[in-house]
Each structure stands twice: as structure tokens, then as C-alpha cells.
């Protein structure tokens, strides 16, 4: 059963991008949206010929930053956001059904076989996942050995206590322990952007 909160899907899908840019980034994250885009762009520009899985596709934010020689699969719990993502990927040169596949699913129960993907993405979604341990277990199952994942998530030690950020927030140490437990290495990216933490994981 996929449970949706008001801030995570269909109820705000029409205004999702503007809410993120004008409200969530400056007010909740105390972060610069332009810097966020640049960090993601820099991280993905050298990713080629991969089978990518994104957990929490949202409105298709990553579409402009993924090189066209990759295959992309995105999951989200919001049908309306998946429709927006489909349009954005099409606008950026991808073809749904050929190199882009979008599916309604939750992170704790991914509808894919073992060892299906070589690169993972989870951008500003991990704190909304109800069972984070189960989600990491699922990622470990569907990702190939030696695969890499890129994450961006608000982090407890980088935020002002007054910030009211939704979901379950973890410290960097807790995130590292969670991923190490499921066979991933954990590497912080040397970047700073408000309350946001950027890191990569690799499945050994």
C-alpha cells in the first residue's frame, strides 16, 4: 500500500517545481537551487552507457543532466508527477518505452529483478521513505555488484534546529552505517549547500 503525504505527490504536482525552487530550497533547506543543479550536473555528466534507476523521480528533475546514451528507469508514488517526468524526459531527448521507463512504485518494494541496474539515483527523496532500511535492502538487491548511486538528502548536522523539514532525517554517520550494513561503501561529496548532504555509494 503506497501512502502519500500532501507534500509528496499528486496534491501539489501542478506547483511542485515552483514550490521547490521558491519555498523549499530557500526556506526549508537554506540552500541555493542553482548550486544544487550544478552539483547534480557535475556528478552525472560523466555517467555513460548505464542502466539507471531513480527512486523518487518526482517531476523529472534529473532529465536535463543525464547523458542520452543511458537507459533510465524511474519510480515514484505519484501518478501526476510521473506524467510530468515523462514530459520532461521527452523534452530532453529521451523516448519513453525505449530509453525511459516510468513506473508507480515505492522504494521498499521495487518491481525489478535482482542485479538489474548499474547506477542509482535518489535526489531529495530518501527522508520521505517510511522504511529506510528496507529501501536500502531493495537497492542492494536490484543494483549490480560494482554499481554506483548518487544521493542528495537533508541532513541533521547541516540544518538549523528551527528548520521544519518533513520526513525522517538522519545524520551522515547514521546514513553511512545504514548503507554499510547492506554492502555499500559510502563517500561524501566535498560540497556545501545549506542543509543538504550529497554522497555516493558503491555496491561491493
Image (spheres, rainbow, N blue to C red):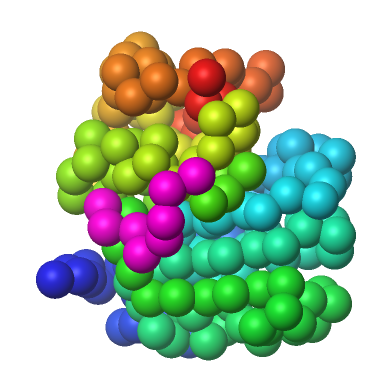
Up-down relation of residue 182 to residue 44 (above or below) = above
Q: Residue furthest front?
A: 114
Expressed as whole percent of the image width and height from the top left, the position of residue 17 reads 56, 71
Up-down relation of residue 101 to residue 45 (above or below) = below
Magenta segment, which residues?
108-115
In the image, 97: left or right of 49? Answer: left
In the image, 9: left or right of 42? Answer: left
- Please identify the dominant SS of the magenta region: loop
Expressed as whole percent of the image width and height from the top left, the position of residue 172 reads 40, 18
Q: The N terminus appears in which quarter of the rendering?
A: bottom left
In the image, 169: left or right of 90? Answer: left
On the image, which quarter does residue 22 sit in? bottom right
Question: Residue at horizontal 58%, vertical 75%?
Answer: 101
The residue nearer to you, when weighing 44 against 154, is: 44
Is any part of residue 27 visible from this angle?
no
Is any part of residue 47 visible from this angle?
yes
Question: Residue at horizontal 85%, vertical 63%?
Answer: 68
Expressed as whole percent of the image width and height from the top left, the position of residue 44 reads 76, 44
Question: Residue at horizontal 19%, vertical 49%?
Answer: 130
Expressed as whole percent of the image width and height from the top left, the position of residue 82 reads 49, 79
Amino acid at each position: 500500500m503506497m501512502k502519500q503525504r500532501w507534500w509528496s505527490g499528486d496534491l501539489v504536482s501542478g506547483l511542485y517545481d515552483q514550490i521547490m525552487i521558491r519555498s523549499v530550497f530557500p526556506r526549508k533547506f537554506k540552500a541555493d537551487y542553482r548550486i544544487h543543479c550544478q552539483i547534480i550536473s557535475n556528478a552525472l555528466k560523466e555517467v555513460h552507457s548505464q542502466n539507471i534507476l531513480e527512486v523518487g523521480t518526482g517531476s523529472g528533475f534529473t532529465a536535463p543532466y543525464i547523458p542520452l546514451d543511458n537507459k533510465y528507469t524511474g519510480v515514484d508514488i505519484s501518478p501526476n508527477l510521473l506524467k510530468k517526468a515523462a514530459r520532461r524526459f521527452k523534452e530532453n531527448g529521451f523516448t519513453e518505452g525505449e530509453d525511459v521507463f516510468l513506473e508507480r512504485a515505492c522504494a521498499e518494494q521495487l518491481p525489478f529483478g535482482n542485479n538489474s541496474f548499474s547506477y542509482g539515483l535518489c535526489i531529495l527523496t530518501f527522508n520521505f521513505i517510511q522504511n529506510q532500511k528496507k529501501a536500502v535492502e531493495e537497492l542492494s538487491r536490484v543494483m549490480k555488484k560494482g554499481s554506483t548511486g548518487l544521493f542528495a538528502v537533508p541532513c541533521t548536522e547541516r540544518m538549523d534546529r528551527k528548520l521544519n523539514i518533513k520526513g525522517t532525517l538522519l545524520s551522515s554517520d547514521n546514513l553511512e552505517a545504514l548503507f554499510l550494513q547492506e554492502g555499500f561503501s559510502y563517500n561524501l561529496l566535498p560540497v556545501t549547500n545549506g542543509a543538504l548532504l550529497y554522497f555516493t555509494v558503491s555496491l561491493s
